[in-house]
Image (cartoon, grey):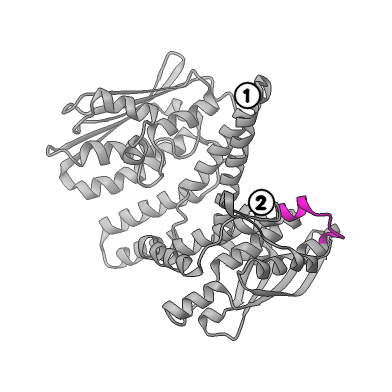
Amino acid sequence: MKAKDLLNSRLEQIASEGKVIAHGRRVLLLDSVVFAALRSELQDFLGQDETQSFLNRLGYFMGHNAARRLRDRYHWNDERELLSACPVLMGWSGLASAKLKRLECERGRGSLLAEISWTDSFESEQQLRHTGVAPAPVCWTLAGYASGYFSLVAGQNMLCLETECAGKGDTRCEAIIKPIAAWGDAARKSAADLARFEAMSRIHHLNAQLHQKERSGDAQQQAALAEALKEAQLKALESQVNPHFLFNTINVIAKLAFLEGASQTEAMAYALADLMRYSLRGSHGDGLVTLRDEVEHARHYLLIQSTRYHDRLKLNFEIDETALDIRVPPLSLQPIIENAFVHGLEPSERPGQFLLSVQKAREYVVISVQDNGVGISREQVHHLLNEEPGARDHWSAHTTGLGLAQVRDRLRYYYGEKCRLVIESEPGSGTTVRLLLPLDGPVKG
């Protein structure tokens, strides 16, 4: 099959069943005005940057799925024809009138470069009609579509970026597609979005496979898929908690504070920069860091909190230095500590008392986070540890997005069932959260 053969394809309408079929799959017909309204709502709710990321990922999924469907359904003359089908399909689908201007593909060297242009983009059309000329390219879904399509066919992460866009006043939209690594700093944010997309796609794929095996009753394959799914979920969590803050800017603020003699502001700024740097840094090859690293990270967070509370907070530390070489997943302590402040100390009217303790006890390293805040009921403890509806969103740490049950599950992944998380609390009497980690270390990693 050749790319141009797609132009002869027809939609199959099965009105009696409420279905429209394209290339063997059910599709939906949506008014572009509705899409424009959705885009506007997202911008009002999420802001422009997050909306762009969302629509770029949506387009990526559309293109990725379309490429897989075409690859599996038809016999193509060669890979070049399948790549050339991307702009043809974009036009056939009503996204834009697209044309492939340049395609250099050397499979042996793993290199690929393409230039694509389009006119009558539905995104540019709606931008100009409802908002006017934009200061930057606006075809976020279309660029994502080309990225996803080329990534699937090429078997590597490809990124499409617009260099010209009708939505910002250019005569047509022009875009370049090349491996994401070849874009350098220009692709930093897109690379993070792509990692999130791929992590979630893998989770959905494994979920579907696991569901099929549950029906067949194959226990061995079920166990293997369940393990792969848990690992994929952990990787997705680790990519989620990276905030990608510009800590270099915070360092500049700290230096300005030093020059102005504002020592407390300087200390807070450096603590915040260290928090960000820790979140952005990579873990070791096994995905773990030392407990010493985690405690130091916690100290930076607590310095900021103590500055906020002034004399209304007393911090206490009981740290056995010999217990700090044990390895744990990064950002295991911060969700627990943050919950102590947000849900324990902040709602309380009395001066705060906080204790971070790390001690050896028989075959365990015991990490305790204790506060004298408002406390929680037994029912709330049950909700927290079982992540019942509403508990995760309400009790997840704000900066990491992790709840206590997720912290426990991450630790159990590495330490096995011997790892324990215990919550002791009563309303009005504060809360203690204890992590018990086997002294002999993780069973994975």
- Relative to residue 39, is residue 217 drawn left or right? right
The one of 92 and 273 positioned closer to us in this rendering: 92
Report the span colored magenta. 69-79
Tell me: residue 155, above or below residue 348: below
Q: Quadrant of residue 265?
A: bottom left
Report the residue at 40% width, 43% height from top. 401
Q: Are marks 1 and 2 in contact (CB under 8 Å)?
A: no
Residue 122 placed where, x, y %?
55, 73
The one of 297 and 228 positioned closer to us in this rendering: 228
Residue 134 in sight in this render:
no
Q: Is residue 74 magenta?
A: yes
Give the residue pinned by disc 1: 223
Give the residue pinned by disc 2: 25
Tell me: residue 208, above or below residue 119: above
Report the residue at 71% width, 52% height from top. 69
Residue 428 placed where, x, y %?
16, 28
Residue 368 placed where, x, y %?
34, 27
The one of 89 and 267 positioned closer to us in this rendering: 89
Tell me: residue 167, above or below residue 95: below
Question: How packed is label 1: few (under 14 Cα within 10 Å), some, or many (20 or more)?
Answer: few
The one of 371 and 107 positioned closer to us in this rendering: 107
Residue 303 in sight in this render:
yes
Q: Of helix, strand and loop, which one carries label 1?
A: helix
How far apart are the alpha carbons under marks 1 and 2?
A: 31 Å
Q: Is residue 361 magenta?
A: no
Residue 2 placed where, x, y %?
83, 64
